[in-house]
Amino acid sequence: MRKSGLWGVGLAGAAALSLAAASLVGCGQQAGEPAGQAQSIETYEVPPAQMQSVREALQDVLAANDAGSVSSSDGRLVVMAPASTQESIARVIDDLSQGSAETGPANSAPVRLRFWMVAGGTGQAPADPRLEPLQPALAEASRTLGLSGFTLQGFVDILTSPGKGFSSQSDSLLVTGAAGLTDAGVGIGVDVTMGDAGRWDGGIKTDVVLTPGQFLILGTTDAPGGGMRLVIVQAELASGS
């Protein structure tokens, strides 16, 4: 398995990787090589804050050309593609990573992540002290979305290490992803699935960098029966780090 650093690549890097991969897939079969080359599997290290965008950029190209597939595991990108294409993808990732002086996570301090799923509507809701810490984020939702009443529907709390994958599930919230530390804050690549009593009916998938202690709305979806559902996240460095 090959591991290649990509800690300095953002959305622009993912776009460049997508364009490069498209060219590589088209040219991966050299003159005289037989069609239908055997697939190989390689693993690449990608920073959590860019995992989703880089994965999707490669997946779009490989799927469109019927050349392979991409998945992620424990904060790493797993690419199945022809061997000649793998060599080229590794070179592109290495070239992109050279543009940054940062070659790994800022440090190994544990990170605590908290995710709330909140239902919002236009009517008033009973006061809930569990929502008090979220008031800055909820006030922004009221201002931009016209919501006035909020009800807590799901919560998970996760302690993870930089560069490692995480997963947590409640009755109404399933969260998977990976986190890392950078000079800008806590970077996460996360996939959130929402539902009720295990019946999943909505989701949000995104990459974001959080200021420690900040409450941030990751995304909003419509809710069954009307209203909206918000997913709010907070990242903190674990006590003693």
Image: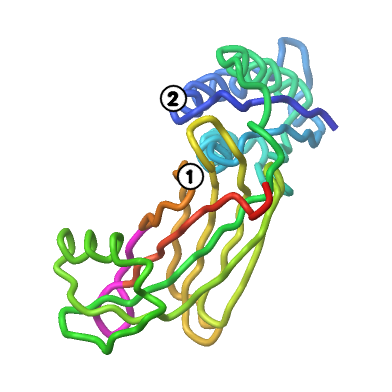
Residue with the mark numbered 1: 207
Secondary structure state at the residue bearing disc 2: helix
In the rendered view, does 108 fall on the left or right side of 120?
right
Q: Where 183 sits versus 149, above or below?
A: above
In the rendered view, does 166 fall on the left or right side of 33?
left
Colour theme: rainbow
Front residue of this view, candidates 189 and 55: 189
Disc 1 residue type (three-letter): Asp
| Residue at left offset 68%, top offset 54% | 160
Front residue of this view, candidates 22 and 103: 103
Residue with the mark numbered 2: 12
Q: Taking the image as drawn, is residue 141 in sight?
A: yes
**Location of residue 239 by image quarter:** bottom right
Residue bounds of the magenta highlight = 219-228
The image shows residue 54 at horizontal and vertical percentages of: 55, 35
In the rendered view, does 184 fall on the left or right side of 97?
left
